[in-house]
């Protein structure tokens, strides 16, 4: 059940480094110089109150927004200014805070999309798959593997929009796994789902890291942060106010207060 | 760490995409088989009226199935499809027309090539596809309502050029005497002979589009329609996909235009106006977008309805208005009770 990562290039560290990121929306400075790094096999938890700029930071690093200032590299190569699909091609994936499963596609198709996208983006920008059957048994079989890895037990033909919120998150996670990314951003994967679902989600996230993926995680619940994270980055009002190993950071009274104070 | 017990409830049933499974109950070959049978039976009898209807059905099938790729699959509501239809018709016409004696219409236009049938058809498709691609470069900067307005604008620009640039294609005077198809020295005279050529063409093209619908490409387009941000995060180059969809759709629309021009032999810009584009979107929404059955059903109804009304025996002037009212009522009722269309997967969002 270990996530098999197919490395894109043989010799790379897989480290994602970002420095001094700034972002304004109109008059509001949302990020005011944020730096950090994501390391393969490690889970880095981003904590802090609502509005701290965590989601915005994830949007910068996944190509959805462009920063006003700062730099970010994956294996030493710039990632800022690339569109999300190019970054996906370079191994960066995301679980959205608002989930975003494809509502009118079946559960199976939701995952097949990610497999199909992964198989055609690398070095084949004009491989559209115009005549390749998008519903082949081979694709379906692969998709079922990802679905069973997350323990999906709904009818695979059900439309995603008819699933519960927790199941949609699980489906989005299966879709993320199908992307075989080497660096993933999980924006509140556990928030708003039942304890049962949360207990499914936690070991899956841990497995991702064990398989060598660099995991960035936004999470409010301090018990999950404690049980999952190697590193913790505490953000508030657009700056990093504390960071370091999980045990160290979480022992700071101030940090606990910010996390628990939510 | 304890892993989740994977569900054993995933049945190894045949893989069917949600889009088609509840909505595509009729196998396509059966549809085509029925159509072919109908044609063979009717050929024995040969009423011109029926063959004319079938020709128009074929042409509109090309238009609706191609628009479906952009609008039903990509979720991009385009109001410029009739423009590509017109470009195909005019490209075919000027490619076919011979430069005649002084005072002849062909002498008064910029370019008349006098090509044979097959090169002219291919030329029309290529020109249509080229325009589709160029238009996609402009319009795909927008999404939603802005995309709709951008395509409206393109439709109006292309129509104005056809209508006002008299030296190009004689504007409102239109082009007449467009040569009918002749293949291997065999010229198609009546509409029944025309059908013999059109049916294989339409069957092939619609069949090919059907393969595209079901392809990985079709699935990527649907993902884009469902949630473009999520689609991009999986690695789909959505603009590139949509651009190709618009290029293919415009090429097929141009083929429909070329077929139309070679069939009626006289064209003027009014056949390719904004109201025709609106009609095509309405037709698709009526039948249902995002699968194959939808456009077939929509086309069938929209082509058959005016004819059915003839039997009611209304005077022509009244009938045209009543027809518009019925179309409008049908659409409004449909949006109310069955927004996904008669045979549809889903109503097309903007
Ligand atoms: N697109 C946007 N336009 C304007 N303000 C935004 C936008 N996105 C986020 N913000 C603002 O930026 C701040 C940080 O938001 P966000 O990054 O979502 O915080 P977090 O994820 O830490 O809760 C908030 O005050 C939010 O209102
Ligand atoms: Mg957030």
Image: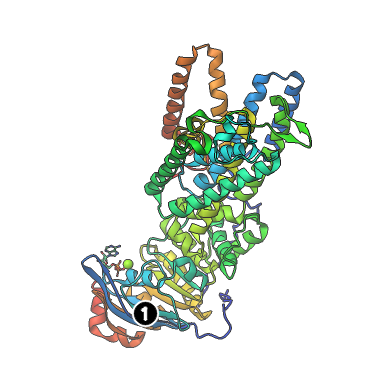
Q: Is residue B231 above or below residue B182?
A: below
Q: In this view, does B339 lie above or below A77?
A: above
Q: In this view, does B44 lie above or below A124?
A: above
Q: Where is residue B277 in the image (x, y as percent from the top left)?
A: 48, 36
Q: Position of residue A137 (x, y in %)?
A: 67, 58
Q: In this view, does A92 lie to the left or right of B216?
A: left
Residue shown at 50% from the left, 86% from the top: A13
Residue shown at 55% from the left, 16% from the top: B310
Q: Position of residue A231 (x, y in %)?
A: 38, 83
Which residue occupies the foreground of this view, A158 or B8? A158
Q: In this view, does A48 lie above or below B343?
A: below
Callout 1 secondary element: strand
* Picture quadrant of ligand 2: bottom left
Rendering colour mode: rainbow
User: Could you tell me which chain the residue with mark 1 belongs to?
Assistant: A
Which residue occupies the foreground of this view, B293 or A63? A63
Residue B256's image quarter?
A: top right
Residue B89 seen in render: yes
Q: Is residue A77 left or right of residue B124?
A: left
- Disc 1 residue crowd, few under 14, some 14–19, many 20+, Cα 10 Å: some
Residue shown at 45% from the left, 24% from the top: B324
Q: Is residue B198 left or right of residue A163?
A: right
Residue A158 seen in render: no
Q: Where is residue A64 in the image (x, y as percent from the top left)?
A: 39, 66
Q: Mark 1 points at which residue?
A: A71
Mark 1 and ligand 1: say if the CB distance to the nearest ligand atom is below 8 Å: no
Residue shown at 63% from the left, 31% from the top: B101
């Amino acid at each position: 059940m270990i996530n098999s990562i197919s490395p894109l290039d043989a010799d790379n560290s897989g480290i994602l480094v970002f420095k001094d990121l700034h972002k304004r929306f109109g008059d509001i400075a949302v990020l005011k110089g944020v730096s950090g790094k994501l390391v393969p096999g490690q889970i880095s938890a981003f904590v802090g109150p609502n509005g701290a700029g965590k989601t915005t930071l994830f949007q910068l690093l996944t190509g959805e927004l462009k920063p006003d200032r700062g730099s970010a590299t994956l294996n030493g190569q710039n990632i800022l200014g690339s569109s999300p699909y190019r970054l996906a091609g370079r191994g960066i994936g995301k679980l959205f805070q608002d989930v975003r499963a494809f509502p009118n596609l079946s559960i199976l198709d939701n995952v097949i999309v990610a497999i199909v996208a992964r198989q055609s983006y690398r070095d084949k920008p004009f491989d559209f798959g115009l005549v390749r059957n998008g519903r082949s048994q081979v694709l379906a079989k692969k998709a079922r593997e990802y679905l069973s890895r997350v323990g999906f037990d709904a009818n695979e033909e059900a439309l995603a929009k008819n699933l519960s919120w927790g199941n949609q998150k699980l489906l989005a996670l299966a879709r993320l796994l199908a992307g075989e990314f080497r660096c993933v951003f999980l924006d509140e994967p556990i928030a708003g789902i039942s304890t049962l679902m949360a207990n499914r989600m936690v070991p899956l996230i841990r497995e991702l890291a064990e398989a060598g993926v660099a995991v960035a995680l936004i999470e409010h619940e301090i018990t999950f942060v404690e049980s999952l994270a190697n590193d913790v980055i505490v953000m508030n009002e657009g700056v990093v106010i504390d960071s370091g190993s999980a045990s160290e950071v979480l022992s700071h009274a101030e940090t606990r207060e910010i996390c628990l104070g939510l | 760490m304890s892993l989740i017990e994977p569900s054993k409830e995933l049945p190894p049933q045949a893989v069917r995409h949600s889009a088609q499974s509840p909505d595509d109950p009729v196998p396509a070959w059966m549809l085509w088989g029925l159509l072919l049978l109908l044609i063979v039976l009717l050929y024995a009898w040969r009423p011109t009226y029926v063959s004319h209807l079938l020709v128009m059905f074929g042409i509109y099938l090309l238009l609706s199935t191609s628009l479906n790729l952009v609008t039903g699959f990509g979720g991009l509501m385009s109001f410029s499809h009739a423009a590509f239809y017109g470009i195909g018709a005019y490209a075919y016409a000027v490619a076919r027309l011979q430069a005649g004696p002084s005072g002849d219409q062909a002498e008064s236009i910029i370019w008349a090539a006098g090509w044979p049938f097959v090169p002219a058809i291919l030329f029309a498709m290529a020109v249509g596809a080229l325009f589709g691609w160029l238009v996609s470069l402009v319009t795909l900067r927008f999404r939603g309502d802005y995309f709709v307005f951008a395509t409206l604008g393109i439709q109006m620009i292309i129509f104005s050029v056809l209508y006002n640039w008299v030296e190009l294609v004689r504007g409102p005077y239109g082009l007449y005497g467009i040569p009918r198809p002749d293949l291997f020295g065999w010229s198609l005279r009546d509409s029944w002979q025309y059908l013999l050529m059109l049916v294989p063409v339409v069957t092939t093209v619609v069949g090919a589009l059907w393969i595209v619908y079901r392809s990985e490409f079709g699935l990527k387009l649907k993902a884009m329609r469902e949630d473009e941000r999520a689609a991009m995060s999986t690695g789909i180059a959505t603009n590139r996909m949509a651009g190709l969809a618009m290029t293919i759709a415009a090429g097929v629309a141009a083929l429909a235009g070329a077929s139309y021009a070679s069939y009626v032999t006289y064209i003027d810009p009014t056949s390719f106006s904004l109201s025709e584009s609106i009609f095509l979107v309405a037709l698709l929404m009526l039948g249902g977008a995002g699968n194959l059955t939808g456009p077939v059903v929509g086309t069938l109804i929209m082509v058959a309805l005016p004819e059915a009304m003839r039997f009611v025996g209304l005077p022509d002037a009244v009938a045209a208005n009543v027809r518009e009212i019925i179309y409008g009522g049908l659409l409004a009722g449909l949006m109310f009770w069955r927004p996904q269309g008669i045979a549809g997967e889903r109503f097309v969002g903007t």
